Amino acid sequence: MPDGTKLTRIPTLRTVADFRKHVAALGLDLPCEDSIVTGADSPLAQPVNSVTINGKTIGNRIAIQPMEGWDGTTSGGLTEEMRRRWQRFGESGAKLICGAEAMAVRPDGRANPNQLIIIEENKAGLAELRQILMNAHQQRYGSTEDLVIGFQLTHSGRFCKPEDKSRMEPRVAYRHPILDKKFNVTSDTQIFSDSEIEQLIEKYIEAAKIAWDVGADFVDIKHCHGYLLHEFLSALTRPGKYGGSFENRTRVLREIVSGIRASGNKIDLAVRLSAFDLVPFKPDPTLSLPGKPGPGIPEDFSPCLPYRYAFGVDQNNPLEYDLTETFQFAELCAEVGIKILNLSAGSPYYNPHIQRPAVYPPSDGYQPPEDPLVGVARQINVVRKVKESVARLQGYKVTSVQNDPQVTLQPCNHVTFAPIIVGSAYSYLQEYLPHVAQAVVRHGWTDMIGLGRMVLSYPNVFPDALERGTLNPKAICRTFSDCTTAPRNGLISGCYPLDKYYASKPEAQKLKEIKRGLP
Ligand SMILES: Cc1cc2nc3c(=O)[nH]c(=O)nc-3n(C[C@H](O)[C@H](O)[C@H](O)COP(=O)(O)O)c2cc1C
Ligand code: SF4
């Protein structure tokens, strides 16, 4: 830790009491139940009754978060690794599949040459993936009536590497005073023009049609992690109809939604949003050693104040978030009929500690500048605030499952429903993930618990919690970050440390060498 104190590792906290003591010592607001509740009484086993998706009620409170693939063919076709991943998602018991993995709406918008592309030519493959997931779920749980599957639609913007894993081909919404250097943005020609954006919007509309044709229940119009549409939300310095005012910066979303509806496509809609952001971080050069980056420190933002280059940030102190526009955006989502608002934070490329809290950094990251539990609690508390804000829109109640007191909020008539809220960044909780997840759902702080890394290492986490009331410590994700380090170095992603399937691949050896600093 930057202050020289030793990080307390979660597995060393033997009991719930130890965990709570640690949370209290960090001064965090993080509720935690005494034990894992099994069976139908678990708050996590309750259906989501507030909104239906494609006519279905989501059968429980567990969502699988999207996790980009680096393992397709270069034309966006399927491979065994992909099929296996989708099968495991189906077996996980989660009743909401929030995109499964990001799919580029056109080839040049890929973050890597092996990412899925959602275009006509790949329809059969996408249908196959969905069917694999459905079959796996049906086989294990006997029904798919309450299983809801979406596809995440993306253009990778600043992080595009569509043709070659080592060649950045960024396209951006605006020039960024800090990120341009890091991501090879050197010319204004890399900025999307308004007419290019109009063409791109058409691709989102076409992709939504393909998703509907192959049986997806919804599409997620990705607005997170610094990718293109997230960047538009902070395009304060961009001139023209897609920049400047809040109305202009959200025009892309509104035009995609109205285009999908005008095309007659009835598919339901979701948005994944980085609800807040901070400035980019870097390893402290004075404390970095070869193969061991120093603790994260903010990039020098002093020449950039007021900081007008991130969404959901305090412009005068960009080390703090500001949710004013986040609430406004959530309200807009409700107004245009977005049914699922899946909340995340920041970006894995420039401030990973707020996005996916971890003890061990990825190779392009830095040692944690704070206890990763702080990052988990930050996201959980922001999700709570956003949920309260959308609930207010309709005189909705902050619904608690089971017996907690319900809070009645102000009525408001212009929205017909409040979107289902999904939270992120639970994996670092490890042994205590179910205890915290139960508590936040029971208190109504979120509707659903989104799981990312934990299901890569441990797809059985939810069935084990629900059926046995205990977790398998050997399968719990320990946030080693290999699933990020591998693709950052041109290898396929996967849980190399804990999933034997990856541990036995030749890539595992290569990854070891990369981590040891060998060429
Ligand atoms: C390997 C990997 C790939 C990811 N790809 C995506 C993606 O394609 N789209 C997205 O919205 N989030 C992506 N994420 C972020 C996760 O959805 C999630 O927000 C993050 O891992 C934090 O949740 P966790 O603590 O449960 O892992 C990815 C995360 C990982 C580890
Ligand atoms: S490589 Fe495995 S243990 Fe490490 S963060 Fe990814 S899923 Fe977790």
Image (spheres, grey):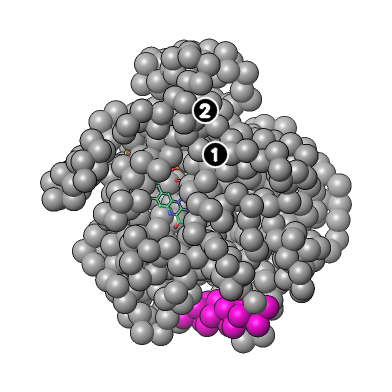
> Which of pointers 2 and 1 lies earlier in the amino acid sequence?
1
Label 1 belongs to which residue?
281
Residue 298 higher or lower than 455, as above or below: above
Label 2 belongs to which residue?
369
Tag 1: residue type?
Answer: Phe
Q: Which residue is found at the position 72% from the left and 70% from the top?
A: 242
Q: Which residue is found at the position 57% from the left and 43% from the top?
A: 280
Q: Give the number of the mark in front: 2 or 1.
A: 1
Q: Label 1: state its secondary structure.
A: strand
Q: Which residue is found at the position 61% from the left and 23% from the top?
A: 28
Q: Is residue 295 left or right of residue 271?
A: left
Q: Which residue is found at the position 44% from the left and 24% from the top?
A: 287
2 and 1 marks in contact (CB < 8 Å): yes
Residues in magenta, as a range = 194-210
Q: Is there any visible trace of residue 219 in the rendered image? A: yes
Residue 189 higher or lower than 391, as above or below: below
Residue 46 magenta: no
Residue 518 higher or lower than 308, as above or below: above
Q: Is residue 239 left or right of residue 266?
A: right
Q: Is residue 457 left or right of residue 335?
A: left
